[in-house]
Image (cartoon, helix red, strand yellow):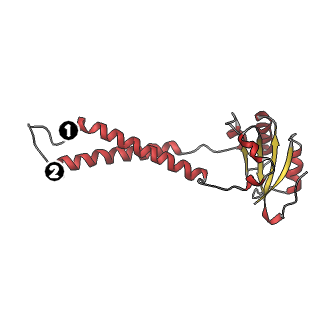
Amino acid sequence: MSTAVDRSSLYGLIAEYDSPEQVVHAAESARKAGYTKMDAYSPHPVEGMEDALGLQPTRLGFVVLAMGLIGAVAGYAMQWYAGAEFYPLNIGGRPMNPWPAYIVITFEVTVLASAFTAGLFMLARNGLPRPYHSVFNAPGFERASRDGYYLCVESVDPRFDEAAVRTFLEGTDPVRVEEVAS
């Protein structure tokens, strides 16, 4: 039994399932039915869920690689400028550009730039930090961090019709289907 939610503040409909296989099957069925604005929640990563939801691969690897290369060039250039241009010291006939001595710092700056980029890009892509989300209003949703599997079809989906989505979700054999308030 669902509680009544004001239609203007409806976030979507959420269905609870008993197993990861059920939620993957429901997500695949929803995708085939034409729903695109949906998300799944589970206490652990579920194999095949990304494909079932139709999520696009991320460009995170390319961004991290680019920033790593920029970090490497910046780290090397910083050392070269400091040792060869800004404060050159010719001690014992060593070259002004002793690149083997610069490798460690260059590597460390590469890793630093890559790690910061990966962390910040991940936070931005996930929309974090987000201390509140509408699905927290769903009855029993606290089980999503223990043993619950949920599929939520959002009301911003172009094909969203509350009655049709409810009928569709109930046809995927869930434990229950609830309305989610914004």
Quarter of the image that includes the C terminus = bottom right
Which residue does the image show at 89% across and 55% down from the upper left? Answer: 163
Q: CA distance from mark 1 to mark 2?
A: 14 Å
Which residue does the image show at 85% across and 48% down from the upper left? Answer: 177
Q: Is residue 143 left or right of residue 166?
A: left
Task: Say which amino acid is labelled 1.
Answer: Pro
Q: Of label 1 and label 2, which has the lower sequence position? A: 2
Task: Say which amino acid is labelled 2.
Answer: Tyr
Which label number is shown at residue 155? Answer: none
Residue 125: x and y in percent read 58, 51
Q: Secondary structure at mark 2?
A: loop
Out of 182 and 50, give the one closest to the viewer.
182
Which quadrant of the view contains residue 131?
bottom right
Location of mark 2 (residue): 87
Q: Is residue 43 left or right of residue 91?
A: right
Residue found farthest to the left: 92
